[in-house]
Image (cartoon, helix red, strand yellow):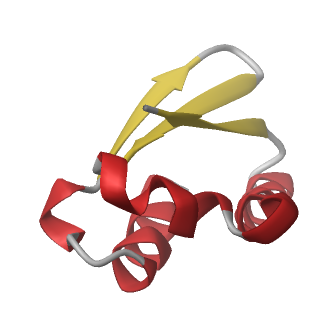
Amino acid sequence: MKEIIEIIARSIVDAPDAVSVTEISGMHTSILELKVSKADIGKIIGKKGRTADALRTILSAVSAKGKKRAVLEIVD
């Protein structure tokens, strides 16, 4: 799950070296924290949050296959 979000985020932003994804695993839930540079935060969120929603949809589809819930948080 972490790798998929990282690959997609690196392809969207202008500074792919600044992208980092941290995974915090729990019993039934994983929290993925996505950090990008300040200049690229708008590209990750997208217009009206559409890009962020798309990333969350992809993440939920992948996590459902593993029978685990995943949450994506975009951190400044």
Residue 9: horizontal and vertical position, in percent? Answer: 45, 69
Quick one: which residue is furthest to the left in this view? 17
Quick one: which residue is furthest to the bottom in this view? 11
Residue 68 visible in the displayed image: yes
Quick one: which residue is furthest to the top in this view? 27
Residue 50 visible in the displayed image: no
Residue name at image x 28 percent, y 56 percent:
19
Residue name at image x 55 percent, y 60 percent:
42
Residue name at image x 49 percent, y 22 percent:
24
Residue 63: horizontal and vertical position, in percent? Answer: 75, 53
Residue 56: horizontal and vertical position, in percent? Answer: 77, 56
Q: Quadrant of the N terminus?
A: bottom right
Residue name at image x 20 percent, y 70 percent:
15
Q: How many marks?
A: 0
- Residue closest to the eye, 55 or 25: 55
Q: Quadrant of the C terminus?
A: top left
Figure quadrant of residue 49 = bottom right
- Residue closest to the eye, 39 or 62: 39
- Residue closest to the eye, 62 or 17: 17
Figure quadrant of residue 57 = bottom right
Residue 35: horizontal and vertical position, in percent? Answer: 37, 42
Residue 20 vertical position relative to residue 39 in the rendered view, above or below: above
Residue 49 vertical position relative to residue 38 in the rendered view, above or below: below
Left or right: 38 with respect to 76?
A: left
Figure quadrant of residue 72 = top right
